[in-house]
């Protein structure tokens, strides 16, 4: 029996590796072209904004009472919302980067099913520009349910992501997951009072606390944008829990406060398709922990409280090499992927301030992103980030993560996808752990079944959708997947384990599962998601439990 289990696990790992192997073979192919300027020096003639309704694909309004009713209920996005995202104007110089970035800006609003910017000659020295957008149904009165890792979760919301066609978002939400119940209200305005400012406000009440979040930011909307800023405040009161073999083995009340104010400036001399930027500002962060009150924490070692305040500075580099791909995650949806290099390094210094009771600390942050065009029409993007915290008379702490995602479109309705994630904690607090099982990955095992200070996850999925689209609203499909992962728990000492907790027989051991499930993609909603239901079969018996398949309803939407 053990030989059979090992053989099956080996097949799952082999399937994952075979799907990821093409990542190492990179083909240097140019990005796909978009709207272009026929010759240097031409200018923009007429700009036409074509707005299509939810059930209108350009050949007239949708037929049928459902299509007509949806178009009546939906307020079409106003032309000013689209026009204010354009980085070119009539009579101005035609610039291909401005055309491409404008299309990405409009698509990034999350209000449309399709965004296209095309040019056509209008004489020897001019081009006319057509901006065509297809609205998505933004009114959301929905309820969802998911089950991952043997834990139930549900979500009910009412709101609109495009109030009165102005691009404002307002939502009320009630949700439940394996840790807490949450009731929240949120408002977002991506163009506050018609400016480049983005305002976001979220207030929620939780069964174990609450959260308040405010943000006012002016992002870089193009490579040649001269400056940006960010003001943010978040206060969270809840409970921090740690898990061992899927069971809670430590619990503390937590109050977290994060506040920052910063500005970034684009350096002169940057090239047409790349930019250097420097940033600076001030931040305050506080982490306070306490006894949950109903019972003493089962874990004797708790997280270390910290209060940090001081300036930060950084340098950033970004180059644009965007490609547009359709149907990578959801059918009929375009995705913008930057294959260019993006890198940043920052330093934050906390000072000892008696009035704020802060501690001295130096934190170094780093980030890196790069993409590639792969053989057979594939595309991949890898990102990495890290934080190193230095304190006097204390061990250096660090948090590193690397994520690589790849897609190979076999047809407009058939995609092969691969994901690799690596997380590593160095000398973390007792309350910091990495998990696999359920939501973090490995759908065939219970929630947070495996805990440690480092984890590696690899996933391969084969997604195929059919041609049937009931009422023009949905597109059914099916997925087959294989997952393999490992958690190294050697960093968790006996003093950090709950009494009686089951210790893994091997501190670094592979786990794997395979599965299949239906997909129902939503074709008309602004979210572009749909129903995901997977039946995952674990390849081993975990923590003394029977090896039975688990049903996972819902999975990550960025893969």
Image: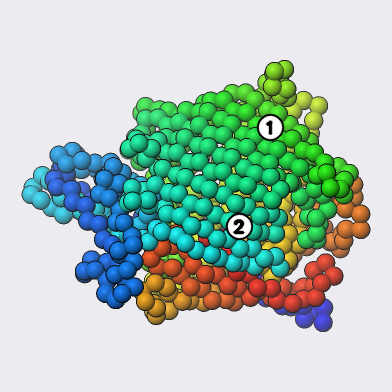
**Vertical relation: 535 (above or below) 394:** below
**Vertical relation: 185 (above or below) 418:** above
- Residue 474: horizontal and vertical position, in percent? 42, 73
From the image, tell me which residue sits under label 2: 175
Q: Nearer the viewer, residue 170 or 213?
A: 170
Q: Which of the 4 image quadrants contains residue 363?
A: top right
Tell me whether circle 1 and circle 2 mark residues in contact (CB < 8 Å): no
Which residue is found at the position 34% from the left and 62% from the top?
73
Q: Earlier in the sequence, mark 1 or mark 2?
A: 2
Which residue is found at the position 73% from the left and 59% from the top?
448
Q: CA distance from mark 1 to mark 2?
A: 27 Å
Q: Nearer the viewer, residue 372 or 483?
A: 483
Q: Which mark is residue 286?
A: 1
In the picture, measured across the screen, residue 250 lies left or right of residue 468, that is right
In the picture, measured across the screen, residue 425 lies left or right of residue 530, that is right
Kindly state the secondary structure of the residue where label 2 is placed.
Answer: strand
Which residue is found at the position 66% from the left and 49% from the top?
206
* Category of crowding for the residue at label 2, using alpha-carbon neighbours closer than 10 angstroms: few (below 14), some (14–19), many (at least 20): some
- Residue 117: horizontal and vertical position, in percent? 26, 54
Q: Which of the 4 image quadrants contains residue 94?
A: top left
Q: How many marks?
A: 2
* Category of crowding for the residue at label 1, using alpha-carbon neighbours closer than 10 angstroms: few (below 14), some (14–19), many (at least 20): some
Q: Which mark is residue 41?
A: none
**Vertical relation: 188 (above or below) 58:** above
- Residue 441: horizontal and vertical position, in percent? 65, 62
Kindly state the secondary structure of the residue where label 1 is placed.
Answer: strand
Which quarter shows the N terminus? bottom right
Report if residue 280 is visible in the image.
yes
Residue sitting at the far top: 354
Q: Nearer the viewer, residue 497 or 198?
A: 198
In the picture, measured across the screen, residue 104 lies left or right of residue 427, that is left
């Amino acid at each position: 029996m053990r030989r059979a289990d090992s053989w099956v696990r080996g097949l799952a790992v082999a399937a994952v590796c075979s799907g990821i192997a093409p990542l190492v073979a990179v083909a240097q192919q140019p990005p796909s072209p978009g709207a272009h300027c026929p010759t240097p020096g031409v200018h923009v003639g007429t700009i036409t904004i074509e707005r299509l309704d939810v059930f209108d694909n350009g050949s007239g309004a949708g037929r049928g009472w459902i299509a007509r009713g949806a178009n009546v209920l939906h307020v079409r996005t106003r032309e000013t919302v689209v026009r204010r995202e354009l980085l070119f104007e009539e009579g101005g110089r035609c610039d291909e980067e401005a055309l491409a970035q404008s299309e990405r800006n409009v698509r990034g609003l999350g209000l449309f099913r399709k965004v296209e910017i095309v040019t056509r000659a209008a004489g020897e020295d001019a081009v006319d520009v057509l901006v065509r957008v297809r609205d998505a149904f933004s009114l959301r009165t929905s309820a969802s349910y998911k089950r991952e890792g043997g834990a139930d979760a549900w979500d009910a919301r009412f709101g609109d992501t495009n109030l009165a066609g102005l691009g404002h978002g307002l939502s009320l939400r009630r949700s439940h997951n394996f840790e807490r119940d949450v009731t929240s209200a949120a408002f977002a305005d991506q163009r506050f009072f018609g400016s480049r400012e983005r305002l976001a406000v979220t207030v929620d009440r939780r069964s174990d606390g609450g959260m308040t979040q405010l943000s006012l930011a002016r992002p870089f909307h193009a490579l040649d944008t001269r400056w940006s800023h960010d003001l943010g405040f978040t206060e969270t009161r809840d409970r921090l829990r740690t898990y061992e073999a899927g069971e809670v083995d430590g619990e503390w009340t937590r109050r977290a406060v994060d506040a920052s104010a910063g500005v970034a400036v684009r350096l002169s001399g940057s090239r047409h398709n790349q930019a250097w930027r420097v940033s600076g500002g001030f931040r305050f962060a506080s982490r306070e922990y306490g006894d949950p009150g109903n019972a003493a924490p089962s874990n004797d070692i708790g997280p270390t409280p910290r209060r940090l305040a001081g300036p930060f500075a950084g340098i950033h580099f970004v180059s644009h090499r965007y490609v547009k791909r359709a149907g990578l995650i959801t059918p009929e949806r375009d995705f913008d992927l930057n294959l260019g290099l993006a890198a940043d390094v920052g330093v934050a210094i906390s000072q000892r301030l008696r009035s704020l009771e802060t501690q001295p600390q130096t934190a170094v942050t780093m980030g890196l992103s790069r993409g590639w065009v792969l053989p057979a029409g594939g595309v991949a993007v890898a990102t990495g980030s890290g934080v190193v915290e230095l304190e006097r008379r204390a061990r250096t702490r660090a948090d590193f993560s690397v994520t690589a995602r790849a897609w190979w479109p076999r047809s407009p309705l058939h995609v092969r996808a691969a994901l690799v994630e690596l997380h590593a904690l160095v000398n973390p607090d007792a309350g910091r752990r990495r998990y696999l099982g359920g939501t973090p990955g490995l759908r065939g095992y219970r929630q947070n079944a495996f805990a440690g200070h480092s984890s590696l996850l690899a996933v391969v999925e084969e997604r195929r959708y059919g041609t049937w689209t009931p009422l023009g609203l949905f597109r059914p499909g099916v997925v087959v997947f294989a997952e393999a992962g490992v958690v190294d728990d050697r960093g968790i000492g006996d003093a950090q384990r709950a009494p009686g907790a089951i210790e893994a027989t091997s501190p670094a051991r592979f786990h794997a599962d395979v599965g299949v499930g239906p997909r129902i993609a939503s074709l008309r909603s602004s979210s572009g998601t749909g129903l995901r239901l997977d039946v995952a079969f674990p390849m081993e018996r975990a923590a003394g439990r029977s090896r039975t398949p688990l049903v996972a309803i819902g999975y990550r939407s960025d893969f």
